[in-house]
Amino acid sequence: MSDLTIENLSMRFDLPDGTHVQALQDINLEIKTGEIMSVLGPSGCGKTTLLNIVAGFLAPTEGRVILNNEEVHGPASDRGMVFQQGALFEWMSVSENIAFGPRMKNIQAARSKEIVDHLLETVGLHDFGEKAVYELSGGMQQRVALARCLANEPEVILMDEPLGALDALTREKMQGLVLKLWKETGKTIILITHSVEEALLLGERLLVMAPRPGRIHKEYQLPFAENGVDQDLREVKKSDGFGETREEILSMIWEMEEEIMGRTEAGA
């Protein structure tokens, strides 16, 4: 596996009325293999746009993304995406959803079953393989989405608000699962979230993005994700520096939101 490089990345959306929106401006990042990075910022700062460019769903207007020493020109199996809603195949069972990727790669049935069984065990769904997706809770569906992503053996896992729709208790359990999978698989993970607390828990590296044009405002290197692998996440939240960093980032984002509102009111 190789590092992921983002070079001089900018994204502009041209609008029908002849104007344009500069969603991203001159983003430069070097993301090491096996790193878990969280990204947050005010609404409209380009977080999801950045993730979609790395996934290959969007082509940037300037700059490039490089993985395995090759420029990204579209979606590929070396990058897996987990969405806020699982985007699962409702008509398939849990096992069939997880097996979809291996089947598309023409992996032999016996090997595919091994992969599915292993991943069902990994995400704590070993008794639910034959259940229909609609029979599962939201948290369980996101476990299936994670397993389906892992079944493709991506080098980079991209997560766009994957836990945002879950209740508080389920969300905390899933945060623990994400950290467990990160440590056990050694995958590179980039996670978008609107929750400052979640960004602190799930990012050994945390980026705060500034609003339009979207750019990196501040970067943190944090111990909380590593600590959370072996500790109860509630204890991690009580650790030195967690509360102070949370308040610092909240104040930073609040000031950005105030600036955005001021611009909007001035233009009204």
Image (cartoon, rainbow, N blue to C red):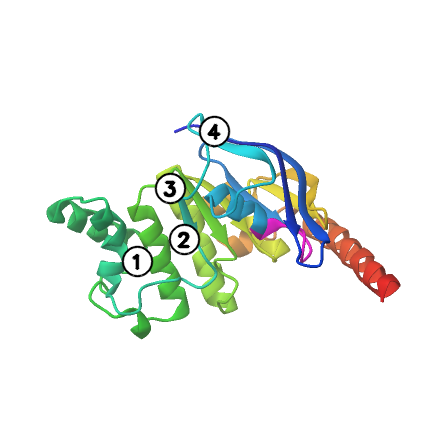
**Residue indicated by mark 3:** 76
Q: First in sequence, mark 1 or 4: give its number.
A: 4
Marks 2 and 1, the one that precedes in the sequence = 1
Label 3: few (<14), some (14–19) or many (≥20) C-alpha neighbours in 10 Å: few
Q: Which secondary structure dominates the residues rendered in magenta?
A: loop
Drawn side of residue 211 relative to residue 92, left or right: right
Question: For mark 2, does the 10 Å Cα neighbourhood hold few (<14), some (14 to 19), or many (20 or more) residues?
Answer: some
Q: Which residue is mark 1?
A: 124
The residue that label 4 is drawn on is 3
Q: Residue at x 31, y 41 (%)?
A: 153
Considering only order in the chain, which callout, 3 or 2, is on the residue closer to the N terminus? 3
Which badge, 3 or 4, comes first in the chain's sequence? 4
Closer to us: 44 or 22: 22
Name the amino acid type tagged 4.
Asp
* Residue 65 in the image: above or below residue 117: above
Query: To which residue does mark 2 refer?
Result: 177
Identify the magenta region.
Answer: 41-48
Residue 202 in view here? no
Q: Residue at x 60, y 50 (%)?
A: 47
Look at label 2 and name its amino acid: Leu
Q: CA distance from mark 1 to mark 4?
A: 30 Å
State if disc 3 and disc 1 touch (CB < 8 Å). no
- How far apart marks 2 and 3 lie (CA) works out to 25 Å
